[in-house]
Image: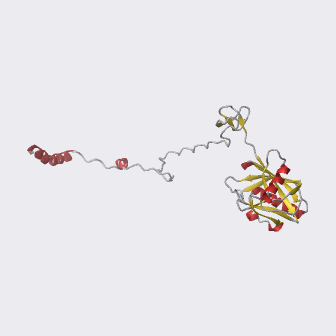
Amino acid sequence: MLLLRSHHLLLPHAARILARRAPPLPRTAAAAARLRPLRMSASNHSGAGASSTSAPSPPPAPAVPKSRIPFCPACGSPTKLAVPDGDEKMRAVCSSCGRVHYENPKMVVGCLVEHDNKVLLCRRKIEPAYGLWTLPAGYLEVGESAAEGASRETLEEACADVEIVSPFAQLDIPLIGQSYIIFRARMKTPCFSPGSESLECALFALDDIPFDSLAFSSIIVTLRMYIEDVKAGNIKFHYCTINKRIGAGPSDLRSFDIDNHLAV
């Protein structure tokens, strides 16, 4: 206990001796800067003597494309994206049997039904564009012609038995992989009613078409072309490309541009 107490008494005295012997450290600007913690800023500053200490951010990782055909329809094995020999595009190639599977555009067919200077529209009961108006139209089935498919879709959606008059428009929409063929048609008997995919059906005078409530860009373009032809007294056949803007809604009136319009 005496030894510990004597050491305890000597410690402050030794510290005072060491403090008198050690010279004070210089407080220069450079030394002070070395003692300050390093701060980094993401913003760039201008001015004399200013320099950036932050490293450039790495570029974002490239998006990895994904196939819309994840499994081989022939053997059921997973597919991988690859460029086959002699090709220029990425294709879904089976990882087991090696078959190459192609993604082709879908054909949509429909009718522009004319009756007493009005056109027949259906209000959709299904998504997409639930509750919006459209011409009766849908995907072409295997084993039927475009005209047969358009007549069938009109019967299914509007319960209307129609006769095809002439082709009116072909509209290509490359971004979503669809091609439309719309036919002018007339009802064999003036009878129609909503089918299983429609909330209601109605005949609209051209000035009363609800353009603010139409379902798809293809329908908007078709009806605008038709109205122009009727007012000009010369109904033509139209072809055009509808270039959808990425991320835009299907019924957004400002979501597309018309290119390559031909009228004959």
Colour basis: secondary structure
Relative vertical location of residue 151 with respect to residue 116 in this rendering, above or below: above
Left or right, 188 with respect to 2, comes to right
How far across and down, in percent of the image, does residue 31 sit? 34, 47
Q: Quadrant of residue 92?
A: top right
**Vertical comparison of 158 with 20: above or below:** below
Q: Total of numbered circles in the picture? A: 0
Q: Quadrant of the N terminus?
A: top left
From this viewpoint, is residue 261 visible? no
Give the camera-side residue of 12 and 47.
Answer: 12
Picture coordinates of residue 35 (x, y %)? Answer: 35, 48
Query: Residue at coordinates 71% horizontally, 33% vertically from top-left?
Result: 99
Give 218 or 69, whichever is nearer the viewer.
Answer: 69
Q: Position of residue 85 (x, y in %)?
A: 72, 31
- Residue 2: quarter of image: top left
Q: Nearer the viewer, residue 109 or 178?
A: 109
Please state the horizontal and vertical placement of residue 138, each as a whole percent of the image.
77, 53
- In the foreground, 59 or 229: 229
Most extreme residue toward the left is 2
- Residue at horizontal 86%, vertical 57%? 162
Q: Is residue 256 visible?
A: yes
